[in-house]
Image (cartoon, rainbow, N blue to C red):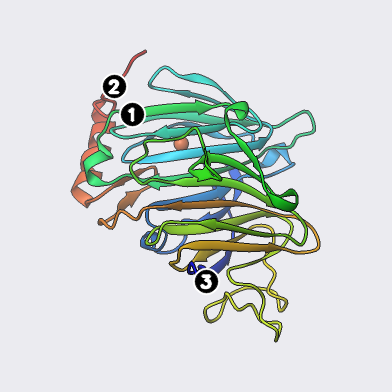
Amino acid sequence: MAKVRRIREVNKSRATVEGAGVHLHRAIGWGRPEQYDPFLLLDDFRSDEPEQYKRGFPWHPHRGMETITYVLRGEVAHGDSLGNSGSIAPGDVQWMTAGSGIIHQEMPKGDSGGAMHGFQLWANLPAASKMMEPRYRGIQSEEIPIVAADGGTVIKVVAGSVAGITGPVRDIVTQPEYLDVTVAAGQTFTHPTPLGHTAFAYVIGGKGVFGEKEAPDGHNAGADGDVDVEPDGLIGDRHLVLFADGEVVSVVADAEPVRFLLISGKPIREPIAWQGPIVMNTEAELRHAFAELENGTFIKNRRA
Ligand code: FE
């Protein structure tokens, strides 16, 4: 039988302020980045209060990494040094590979009710790809396949494969899988994940048991040691579950459906030198990047 991934750690996302004053919840990006390799950061910018997000993320650079933005409600207006501009609408994904460098802006615009719900993931690039040509992919909601599984479970496949259906984002060096999963009430969801890949789930609605099924004594049999789960083993909204290694992820929904982002990728296992929006391997490369920003040679592929 395939080895079910146990829980390595559960963390509640923490409130912080980013950009020009955007109040958000950071799920990844506090601790040692090696722990989530190849992922660096996960920000949850769900808010129903325009005051909390409208100042946005004005023009800023990125190098050596990728940003992946997924919008559920509201829109994010964007523009970049590659000449792209537009809007990330509900259900859309922007997969932006900064590579050698881009300068962009990301400005959240809520919907008519003031709601702006979305997530931004940062994935690292290996040394061999850090200075690759920047690449931008705007993926529309309708391009993302939806897989209907047993019992009413629904999976949106942004990257990776479910039941032979492959998502639109391919050819990324860290072989990421990015799924938006809603497990129907009382149902069990299992999904294969390559052995050795980092895998985590970020809960965005409902509650569920992650890892192996609940033990008869009421404790979560999937939990290794001390983790932040309720006594009944349930994990809810804004909690991130980092899985230990294994071949299969298993999630059981509670009396209500549980919705989560299931993300995995191949670890890079290289030194990480990270300052703000620039992620390199060494301090010297960081200094070089910031010097290039100063002297105007940062952007290598300006189209506009
Ligand atoms: Fe950015």
Give the residue furthest to the bottom: 217
Mark seen at residue 6: 3
Check disc 2 and report its element: helix, strand or loop: loop
Residue 276 vs 97, above or below: the answer is: below
Q: Looking at the image, which is closer to me, 206 or 124? A: 206
- The kind of secondary structure element at disc 1 is loop
- Looking at the picture, which amino acid does disc 1 mark? Pro
For the C terminus, the image quarter is top left
- For label 1, the residue is 134
Crowd rating for badge 3 (residues with CA inside 10 Å; few <14, some 14–19, many 20+): many
Mark 2 and mark 1: span between their CA atoms? 8 Å
Q: Are marks 2 and 1 in contact (CB under 8 Å)?
A: yes
Task: Give the mark nearest the N terminus, 3 or 2.
Answer: 3
Mark 1 Cβ and ligand 1 under 8 Å apart? no
Q: CA distance from mark 1 to mark 3?
A: 36 Å
Most extreme residue toward the top is 304
Residue 295 x %, y %: 23, 28
Q: Where is residue 180 drawn, in percent x and y? A: 61, 46
Question: Which callout, 2 or 1, points at the residue further toward the start of the chain?
Answer: 1
Say whether residue 77 is left or right of residue 31: right
Residue depicted at x 38% and y 34% = 97
Element type at marker 3? Answer: loop
Q: Is residue 197 left or right of residue 100?
A: right
Image-based side of 225 in relation to 176, left or right: right
Which numbered disc, 3 or 2, marks the residue closer to the eye? 3
Classify mark 1: residues with Cα within 10 Å, few (<14), some (14-19) or many (20+): many
Amino acid type at circle 3 is: Arg
> Looking at this view, is 1 or 100 the one in front?
1
Q: Position of residue 224 (x, y in %)?
A: 52, 78
**Which mark identifies residue 41?**
none
